[in-house]
Image (tube, rainbow, N blue to C red):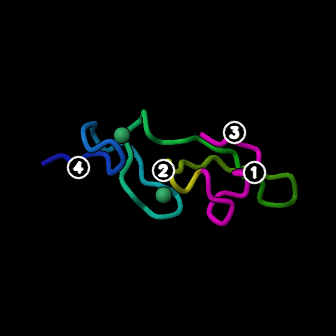
């Protein structure tokens, strides 16, 4: 039994949301590069809800509201 995306509920699970751990498909995962001090950036994937939330995603303020 393959897990499915928790956002669109139709595509195959691909990666979890970094914040809420919701399973996401490739289409629903929102890619972000997070600064972790000392000039280090780490790649992260968020669901559609968390990517717009400044509490979950430090880069949310740079995103256009949908
Ligand atoms: Zn999806
Ligand atoms: Zn999330």
Crowd band around label 3 with a 10 angstrom C-alpha radius: few (<14), some (14–19), many (20+): few
Measure the C-alpha gap from mark 1 to mark 4.
31 Å
Say which residue appears at 75% left-offset and 49% top-offset: 41
Give how far apart the Cα atoms at labels 3 and 4 are: 30 Å
The Cα–Cα distance between marks 3 and 2, rounded to whole angstroms, is 15 Å
Instruction: Give the magenta range.
Output: 52-66
Which residue does the numbered mark 3 point to in the structure image?
Answer: 64
Residue where numbered disc 2 is placed: 47
Q: Callout 2: helix, strand or loop? A: loop
Mark 4 Cβ inside 8 Å of ligand 1: no
**Dot 4 or dot 2, earlier in sequence:** 4
Contact (Cβ within 8 Å) of mark 1 with mark 4: no
Closer to viewer: mark 2 or mark 1: 1
Image point (23%, 49%), residue name: 3
Instruction: Return the residue nearer the eye: 18 or 39.
Output: 18
Between disc 3 and disc 4, the foreground one is 3
Using the image, tell me which numbered label, if any, was put on residue 23: none
Find numbered disc 1 in the image and state the secondary structure of the residue it sits on. Answer: helix
Q: Which residue is mark 1?
A: 61
Callout 4 touching callout 2 (CB < 8 Å): no
In the rendered image, the vertical position of residue 55 relative to residue 60, given as above or below: below
Residue 8, image x and y in percent? 32, 42
Residue 36 percent across, percent down from the top left: 77, 59
Q: How far apart, in angstroms, are the residues tagged by discs 4 and 2? A: 16 Å
Residue highlighted by disc 4? 3
* Residue 44 shown left or right of residue 47 in the figure: right
Disc 3 under 8 Å from ligand 2? The reply is no
The residue located at (38%, 46%) in the rendering is 24
User: Which of pointers 1 and 4 lies earlier in the amino acid sequence?
Assistant: 4
């Amino acid at each position: 039994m393959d897990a499915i995306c928790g956002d669109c509920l139709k595509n195959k699970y691909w990666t979890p949301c970094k914040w809420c751990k919701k399973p996401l498909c490739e289409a629903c995962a929102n890619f972000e590069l997070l600064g972790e001090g000392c000039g280090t950036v780490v790649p992260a994937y968020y669901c559609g809800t968390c990517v717009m939330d400044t509490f979950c995603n430090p880069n949310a303020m740079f995103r256009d509201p949908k």
